[in-house]
Image (spheres, rainbow, N blue to C red):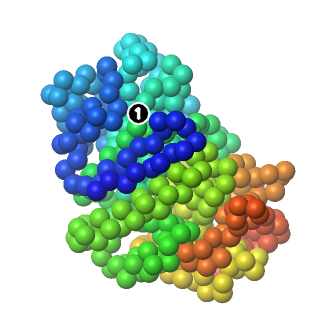
């Protein structure tokens, strides 16, 4: 199946997301058609490289597409300026020119770093996203956001650079650990909250099967397809996050603060799940969400085995300080993408898509969550 992302703000920037099984075997043909180049830099991490790196490069070469593997150590801790610089230097040493292209093979970290390399290498070369995790397939590989983390916070250096193609091979999900599958489900839950009440209900019904390796193929395919459709529809109309695309940040203001203060010991999807639980509670505290919205979101997150409480190491002061560095902060005021109800977000084109929250209320919500967790 194919989902088109029609980018209107940039000429010739639209691209396809191809979803199916066995697609890594067809990658050479897909890449040749959508992203022709003289050479391909296949960028991956040390974990995915062991699983798929050699076979992808071999298949590209068998199809007479010159390719070279560039690997960096796995983990969010390595999504840094240093990794970006090292990869660029290695490509320069290997004499990749402006007629080359990048293939990002891996999860969200690989996609962000490799995309940032593509966006900046020789002032920009084309690239293809080949996500291998659920989170990357349904969220991070779509929309052209690339970048790295810095000591001040997550994704604070980056660029918008749309891929020429996204190839989501569902067979790759079989190699994921349960925690990684659950982390991906956090983004699926987010998609239901921000845009589709029926999809959220589907996730509730399938809670006992989705996320397990024995999940029916048709259920997995429906999940990936619908999440991809939602993400594609939102980013297509707002390439550079100047409007409605901000709703995709539900859970991420608190989530990114958790990641930063935990030194990335928490998976991104886990942090977003916790962030959604607290931001939904914040929406009710501010009076913008229907009563019961937070409880329903929290219940679904727990159903998929995701944490919904702040890590023991998190402090209210530390989280608030980290949120001050969030990209949505304006004039020192933290803003949040908040739901009115499952399937409906606050805001519109005139009023904007994020909500100002007084620091006092934010602290109360974060603090009450910590206190209730400690009394359990």
| Residue 326 pos. (x, y %) | 70, 51
10 vs 131, nearest the viewer: 10
Asked whether, in this view, residue 344 is left or right of residue 107, the answer is right
Residue at 23% over, 44% down:
24
Residue 134: quadrant of the picture: bottom left
User: Which quadrant would the N terminus be assigned to in this image?
Assistant: bottom left
Residue 322: image location, x then y, percent: 71, 52
Q: Residue at x 45, y 66 (%)?
A: 188
Would you place residue 104 above or below residue 275 in this image? above
Q: Badge 1: how crowded within 10 Å, few (<14), some, or many (20+)?
A: many
| Residue at (65% x, 76% y) in the render | 340
Residue 229 spot, x, y in % from top left: 43, 60
Q: Quadrant of residue 20?
A: bottom left
Quadrant the C terminus occupies? bottom right
Where does residue 82 sit, x and y in percent of width and height? 53, 28
34 shown above or below 37: below
Q: Is residue 241 above or below residue 27?
A: below
310 lies above or below 59: below
Q: Residue at x 31, y 19 (%)?
A: 38
Residue behind mark 1: 127
Q: Nearer the viewer, residue 110 or 239?
A: 239
- Pick the residue in front: 119 or 258: 119
- Per the image, label 1 sits on a secondary structure element best described as strand
Residue 363 shows in this picture:
no
């Amino acid at each position: 199946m194919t989902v088109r992302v029609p980018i209107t703000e940039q000429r010739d920037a639209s691209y396809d997301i191809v979803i199916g099984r066995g697609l890594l075997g067809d990658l050479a043909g897909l890449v040749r058609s959508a992203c022709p180049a003289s050479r391909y830099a296949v960028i991956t991490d040390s974990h995915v490289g062991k699983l798929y790196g050699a076979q992808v490069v071999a298949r590209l070469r068998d199809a007479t597409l010159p390719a070279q593997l560039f690997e960096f150590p796995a983990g969010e801790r390595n999504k840094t300026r240093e990794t970006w610089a090292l990869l660029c230097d290695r490509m320069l040493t290997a004499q990749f020119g402006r007629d080359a292209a990048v293939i990002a093979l891996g999860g969200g970290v690989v996609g962000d770093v490799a995309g940032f390399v593509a966006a900046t290498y020789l002032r920009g070369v084309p690239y293809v996203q080949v996500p291998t995790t659920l989170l990357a397939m349904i969220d991070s590989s779509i929309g052209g956001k690339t970048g790295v983390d810095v000591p001040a916070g997550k994704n604070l250096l980056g660029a918008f650079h749309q891929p020429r193609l996204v190839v989501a091979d569902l067979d790759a999900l079989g190699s994921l650990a349960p925690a990684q599958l659950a982390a991906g489900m956090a983004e699926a839950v987010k998609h239901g909250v921000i845009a589709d009440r029926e999809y959220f209900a589907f996730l509730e019904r399938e809670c006992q099967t989705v996320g397990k390796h024995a999940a029916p193929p048709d259920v997995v395919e429906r999940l990936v397809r619908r999440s991809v459709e939602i993400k594609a529809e939102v980013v297509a109309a707002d390439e550079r996050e100047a409007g409605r695309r901000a709703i995709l940040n539900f859970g991420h203001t608190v989530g990114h603060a958790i990641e930063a203060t935990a030194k990335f010991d928490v998976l991104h999807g886990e942090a977003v799940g916790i962030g959604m639980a607290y931001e939904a509670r914040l929406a009710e505290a501010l009076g913008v969400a229907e009563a019961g919205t937070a409880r329903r979101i929290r219940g679904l997150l727990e159903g998929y085995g995701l944490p919904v409480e702040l890590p023991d190491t998190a402090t209210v002061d530390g989280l608030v300080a980290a949120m001050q560095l969030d990209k949505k902060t304006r004039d020192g005021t933290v803003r949040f993408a908040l739901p009115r109800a499952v399937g409906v977000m606050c805001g519109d084109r005139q009023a904007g898509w994020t909500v100002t929250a007084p620091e006092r209320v934010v602290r109360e919500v974060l603090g009450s969550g910590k206190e209730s967790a400690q009394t359990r």
